[in-house]
Image (tube, rainbow, N blue to C red):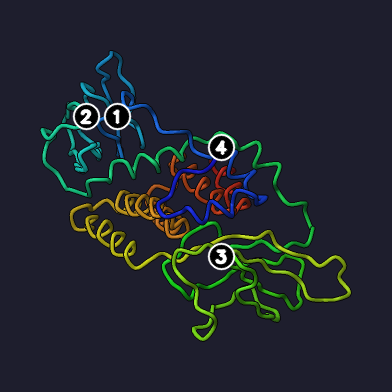
Amino acid sequence: MGTLPLKGENTMRHFTAFMVMILTLSVLAPHAAAGEEDVPAAILLSCTGEVTVERNSGGKIPGSFGLALYAGDEVKTSAASEAEIHFENGMWLQMGVSSSMKIKGTRTKTQPSGVKVGDESFKVVQNMMRLKDPRGTSSLAALRSAPGKPEIALISPCQTRVLTATPTFEWESSGLDEELLLTIYNEKGIHYETKIPGSASYDYPSGAPALATGISYSWAVETTDLLRVPPLRSTASFFEVISEDETGKLDESLGMIDPKKIPNCSTYHFLRASVYFDHGLLEDAINEMKQAMEGDAGMKEMHSILARLYAEAGRTGEAMSEYDRIFEK
């Protein structure tokens, strides 16, 4: 089982199929998309106060972040609550206090008017919502590093696409204080390498061999001390520079998410995170999710999504920290 499909990722898949991180990614991969008959008509993006949903099939349940809404369901807010709904036709709507909204059928043009956030936005948000399933945490726990054991853990860029051809490489080297060798590989072999004394980051220089778009590069960091046998080496990670054409499409999608029309900071950043994730820009999605959580830090579903994004990027330690926050609550 693989990760969620990401646009323009064919070359990336060719490499990642045989790498050791496939264990983590396969354990944490989102489930396949539901059948057409299971596609919801809308999704709850935010609930403040007491929000209830009366199911068309009968019964009443509390509203919650990421709850799927189907034709005939009715969302109700109390005198001190609000809700935000994302419809399948790409519209976003904010419900005020003491109001109700009955959900129409899917693929309809009769939904109440709101803010258009993109024709493909609903599918993009659905893909992000699938990451809130926390299954697979026990397998992740087994991947924790042994206490006190020296290691080199890559931080960025990891299993992601990037917006710049001069990325900054970052890593952690706990228990080490020595010269390291950074090596970048392309499909033919070594693309670039350099020795880095006493640092945990490196800005790819503009004068170095250019990083082309549409090519999957791998990189690793290792010790250079000849007395350390065998040398200590990080797990390889991958990245790909996004093309100018796709950057234009990305900017167009992000431009439709207007902070003036979507005043809720949490929802605004979550929608942006969904777009970045759809384009395979995992680290940008992580940064947006962290900002989304500044206003809803106690929401377990958001911690779960952020944990899965960390896991997708191969950042197991940070993924486990997010899961720990869920289980502590």
> Would you call the spot at circle 2 few (<14 residues within 10 Å), some (14-19), or many (20 or more)?
some
Quadrant of the image occupied by residue 44: top left
Q: Position of residue 256 (x, y in %)?
A: 22, 56
Q: Which mark is residue 106?
A: 2
How much space separates mark 4 and mark 3, taking CA atoms? 23 Å
Q: Earlier in the sequence, mark 1 or mark 2?
A: 1
Amino acid type of the residue that numbered disc 3 sits on in the rendered structure: Tyr
Residue 195 horizontal side relative to residue 306, left or right: right
What number is the disc on residue 40? Answer: 1
Earlier-in-chain disc, 4 versus 3 = 4
Disc nearer the start of the sequence (3/1) = 1
Q: Which residue is mark 4?
A: 1
Of residues 266 and 151, the one drawn nearer to the viewer in this rendering? 151
**Quick one: SS at disc 4?**
loop
Q: CA distance from mark 3 to mark 1?
A: 38 Å
SS at mark 3 in the image: strand
Q: Which residue is mark 3?
A: 217
